[in-house]
Amino acid sequence: MSPGHPDPAADSGDGETGAATPLLEMRSVNAHYGAVHALVDVDLAIYEGELVCLLGGNASGKSTTLKTLLGMLNPTSGEVVLDGEVVNDQPTSYRVARGVTMVPENRRLFKRLTVRENLDLGAYLRSDSDQIAVDMERIFELFPRVKERLTQKAGTLSGGEQQMVAIGRALMADPRVLLMDEPSMGLAPALVQQNFELIQQIHEAGLTVFMVEQNANMALSIADRGWVLQTGRVVLDDTAENLLAHPDLQASYLGTAEQ
Amino acid sequence: MARAEVRPVRRRARKSRTGVDWFLTIMRVAAITVIGLGLLAFIAQEINTDNPFAQWANPDATGLTGAQFQGLIISGVTQGAMYGLIALGYSMVYGVLGFINFAHGEVFMVGAMTGMITSNKLADAGLWESNFVGSLVFIMVVSILVCSLTAVIMERVAYRPLRGSPRLIPLITSIGVSFFLQNASVVLLGPAAKAYPDVPDWIRTKHTFLDIEGAKILVILVAAVSMICLWYFVERTKSGKAMRAVAEDAEIAALMGIDVNRTIVKVFALGGAMAGLAGILWGILFRSVIHTTGFLPGIKAFSAAVVGGIGHLGGAMAGGLSIGVAESVGPLVILEPLGVSGVSQLRDAVAFAVLIGVLLLRPAGLFGERLQAEDRT
């Protein structure tokens, strides 16, 4: 160990990640809801193949971050960069077509539509019908239950089944990075465990996952890296192990770090 | 001791039924009683006009012949089919944007006017007589295009800027748009009633088939075909799926990559097309059109959409048919046996009584699902 040169050493050891452009990036993004400053100079970078998480309590700006990444909310300053391209002025559909897809909080299926129609809508922007059929089969392999329920209205499914359809619907878009908004929200504890295993499984199959969570221990147990957001600011940015061991994690979580 | 325990229970029971509840119950019972008595008296008349129950309220009771009754049903279905076509537009816009577009009746009037202008032009050129079917298809296509365009411009100019404001605001705006279209028609075409050119005999005369006029067969046929096409479009195509997705959750639909604005434009265009078709059918059937033509059919079509369960397409058609048949049959079958005089002038009252009756007995409409608080806030 040569003192004073930890960074170059890390770079040469992990050269690919260090040199590559992030798949999805936020560069000092600020966002406002009217007078409320919801995001303050947020910097995030998600690299291909990672499983990363954004942690934070209520009203810390987690959902705002996702909305800004997807173009449902325009940042007041800063840049959202998708695969090296600044997409600030591009609509949601443009970003979805280029591989950014979200599984929304509380699943938000189209309850009056059938499961099949929900999955079809996931592939709305795609026209490669052969590949769509292949992807649909892959989802049936992953979730055999979904296949059994294809012609049922999505609103009639149980919470766990709806979660499967929600993930399936997102996968139908053939995403490069999957954004997950509070995957543990509104699910029974047993299902939460199952859900995180599912996320890990999807990630191991090669998908980049960015999840936003309140359940820090659960999220960090499967994530590579994470950020902690507090009242719109990134207050911690580290690897999952370091964050788990960080003495301030719980404190910053509860919004007491500054006091 | 025992009485003290009973009291709060009774008080709570009394609280749960308010004056409004009692009023509604009385109204329900009254509505069912009137309909029931009228029907019984009608049946009594049909059996034998001499029996005392048939003459109980109306000593001059004559009953209806089978042919008369059939004629009433057929005209009811014809009217109802047109109400249904217009109602689709109300229902679809409500489904997607959650407000009642009261200017939709005027889009129907624009269709009837477009048909009047085009058909008179064709008649001047001699084409109306020489190739009636071709001309009819032509005026339908022109009317569909004009009405779709009207509806789309209406959305772009009047409603889109108000997206996101409370629902009462676009609703009031739509009443303004309605006045605008009526007055525009007066300015452009004058306030007098205008006639469609003469139609060929086969449209006017009754046919051996079921003893129906050609015009009515035409109306029922065109309405049925366009309803099937619309159903196919909404249920089976990608655009239709996108419409239903936007209707249920616009934010998530956008997340799927659906262009919400474009989808809303399509909804207005489709609703306009249906109203345009209805306008032509109205013109062929009644052969006269004036700037207020859209008002009453528009309000009745809105009632039809509510009766069927607003937001539900099959319901809009069913609601239209129910109101059409009720206003055609109701006066003579229910009111006349009850001794009400001048019943043929009460069609409109009957039509709106159907609306009130359905709202009393089944507030969500015939096919509507009960709206949950979270669905519409």
Image (cartoon, grey):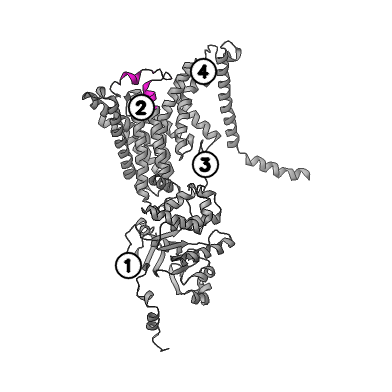
Number of other residues with Cα within 10 Å of mark 3, as a class: few under 14, some 14 to 19, many 20 or more: few
Q: Nearer the viewer, mark 1 or mark 4?
A: 1
- The amino acid type, in three-letter code, at marker 2 is Trp
Residue under numbered circle 4:
B336
Q: Residue at x 40, y 61 (%)?
A: A175
Residue under numbered circle 1:
A84
**Segment tinted magenta in the rendering:** B198-219
> Could you confirm whether marks 2 and 4 are on the same chain?
yes
Q: Residue at x 43, y 57 (%)?
A: A135
Query: Percent position (x, y) of residue B333?
Result: 51, 20
Q: CA distance from mark 3 to mark 2?
A: 31 Å
> In the rendered view, would you say B247 is above or below B273?
below
The chain to which mark 4 is attached is B
Number of other residues with Cα within 10 Å of mark 4, as a class: few under 14, some 14 to 19, many 20 or more: many
Residue under numbered circle 2:
B282
Query: Percent position (x, y) of residue B183?
Result: 30, 33
Q: Nearer the viewer, mark 3 or mark 1?
A: 1
Q: Secondary structure at mark 1?
A: loop
Q: Residue at x 67, y 41 (%)?
A: B13
